[in-house]
Image (cartoon, rainbow, N blue to C red):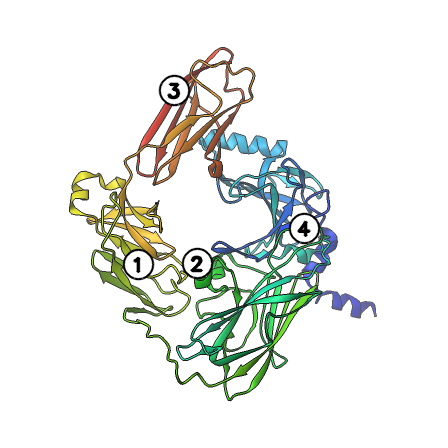
Amino acid sequence: MRYIISNLLLFLPVALFAQSAYRSPVDFPIGLSGTFGEPRTNHFHSGIDIRTQQAVGKKIYAIADGYVSRISVSPSGYGKALYITHYDGNTSVYGHLLSFNETITEYVTAEQYKNETFALNLTLEPEQMPVRKGEVIALSGNTGSSAGPHLHFEIRDTETEEPLNPQAFGFKIEDKTPPTLKELRIIPKSPETTIEKAYKALNIKLTGSDKKYKLTGKDTIRIAGKASFGIQATDQSTGSTAGNGVYSITLSIDKKVVFRQKMDRLNFDNSRCVNSSIDYAEFIAKKNRFQTTEVQPGNSAQIYEITEERGVYTFENQEVYEVKYEVGDFAGNIATVLFYVESAEPDADKKPSETDINGYAIAWDERFDYAGEGIRFYGNSGVFFDDIFFQHSVEKQRPASALAPVHVVGTPAIPMKTPASLMIKPDEDALKKYDSSKLFVVSVDSKGNFAAQESVFQNGTVVAQIREMGRFTIAADITPPVITPVNIADGKKITAQQNIQIKIADNLSGINTYVGKLNDKWILMDYDRKNRLLTYTFDDQLQKGDNIFTLEVTDYAGNKSEVVMKVVY
């Protein structure tokens, strides 16, 4: 018997052992403001967001023995973040931190002064900084791209660096509330498909409670031809008001499971597959995020378990089909909606509106190279999730500051998986008037606002890597960054304060570098990009009496601004 039991243990998931090995990263009950894998802008959420009682400065603990393997400091993204490698093959990640513990802070600060940079990405050896389970490693914060105080927490497979669902590791998270189902979307997938006798998608509100939902109005939908489905659903853990992402979505047709997705494991290379997992056109048009059954050929996300017919189903032969959605959270709470599809012949009196498909055909798995009037658009295979017809036009009107016509490049309703190159030829007068380093490809929104793309000048053209299609032109950035002191002025006595704060902003290309100095010596200034704020916290660089503070800020076009002030301490 002992032999049998010991051998059975070999086949149990590692996560089961980790459940007893890991402690919580916080010392209060875990409440979630974000779940693993939930759709975010251009990515799946790679961890869980733990609420920190709407405050910063909460103690953060190492979940198990291990060593600090990476320290990241950034004005965006995870902000201040720690990576601890454990001895079971996993790495825990703690993001948006306010500060590190004393040992880590001393190490990081020394590296920042050594390299004269705020932003760091440090890799450590196992023997450099060991930590013990339950050790305070940091304080929670709101740094980086965080929209409010919380702890972003991940567990990754150390070898592959793939994020794993932290809820699989036994952290106690009370959840007795099933997901909320909000709306169903039925999407035609061929020009001949009709839904309720119309050649367009249909959205239907869902009503219900106590885990069971139904369609508003009626329970049977008439579909002729190929269609896919989408659902809007959110989840809440007990005591939380946040509408988080769901764990699993299952679709059955006539009691046979034909689609299932589960949020167990992700891969950062597939982050933008989130835009293929939703009805992206509907999201761009109306900000409605429907998670769909269709799995496009370029969608390589690891979330799919069953995808019969790639999530596009044919309804024919005037049959009635039973369709059931089951949407679950990690705690096992399930919400369902049951409805029926009656297949029917398309209405003979109505024809699909003519669709202009004249354009440049791009196969999702082939390289492409389109040359048009004043532009070139090209890329490797895998830029798109599916085959598309690419169209290009030139607008007759353009903003006064545009240095090239406004080019309509494809449509923003088609998602891109990887960047493609966009080359635009500027006006001849622009090439004579401006230094090439000042020229950028810019996207143009509906209000005429510009957003600069990372660009280079090549052979009389400006080339950018773009991740969304839309409207583009060329603009010049000749305006230096703006520096606005917050709590200092020339000649001010600063003995009553603990820091120097400065706001910095740029009108187009963005902040590239900043250098703060006291008495000609570099000082460490934390950069909070979302608030455009630089903060120097007083240290031994500040001397008694008069100090000369200087700050030089440069944008990506090479424009510079500088302030010089005397401060008295």
Kind of residue at disc 3: Val
Label 1, on which residue? 409
Q: Which mark is residue 564?
A: 3
* Local SS, label 2: helix
Q: Is residue 211 left or right of residue 233?
A: right
Which amino acid type corresponds to the residue marked 1 in the rendered image? Val
Q: Residue at x 79, y 70 (%)?
A: 4
Label 3: state its secondary structure.
strand
Residue carrying label 2: 284
Depicted 201 relative to depicted 175: above or below: below
Q: Image point 25% across, 56% down: which residue? A: 395
Q: Which of marks 1 and 3 precedes in the sequence?
A: 1
Q: Is residue 324 above or below residue 95?
A: below
Spatial CA span between label 3 and label 4: 48 Å
Residue 108's x, y, as percent?
Answer: 54, 34
- Assess whether mark 1 and mark 4 are in contact (beta carbons under 8 angstroms): no
Of discs 3 and 4, which sits in the foreground? 4
Task: Give the Cα distance between marks 2 and 1.
Answer: 16 Å
The mark nearer the N terminus, 4 or 2, is 4
Pointer 2: residues within 10 angstroms few (<14), some, or many (20+)? some
Mark 3 to mark 1 CA distance (whole Å): 45 Å
The nearer-to-camera label among 3 and 1 is 1
The residue at 41%/18% (across/down) is 565
Residue 303 occupies quadrant: bottom right
Tell whether label 1 touches label 2 (CB within 8 Å). no
Q: Identify the secondary structure beneath mark 4.
A: loop
Mark 4 sits on what residue?
Answer: 240
Among all residues in the image, which is located at the extreme top?
545
Residue at the limit of the structure toward the right, as seen here: 1
- Residue 72 x %, y %: 52, 41
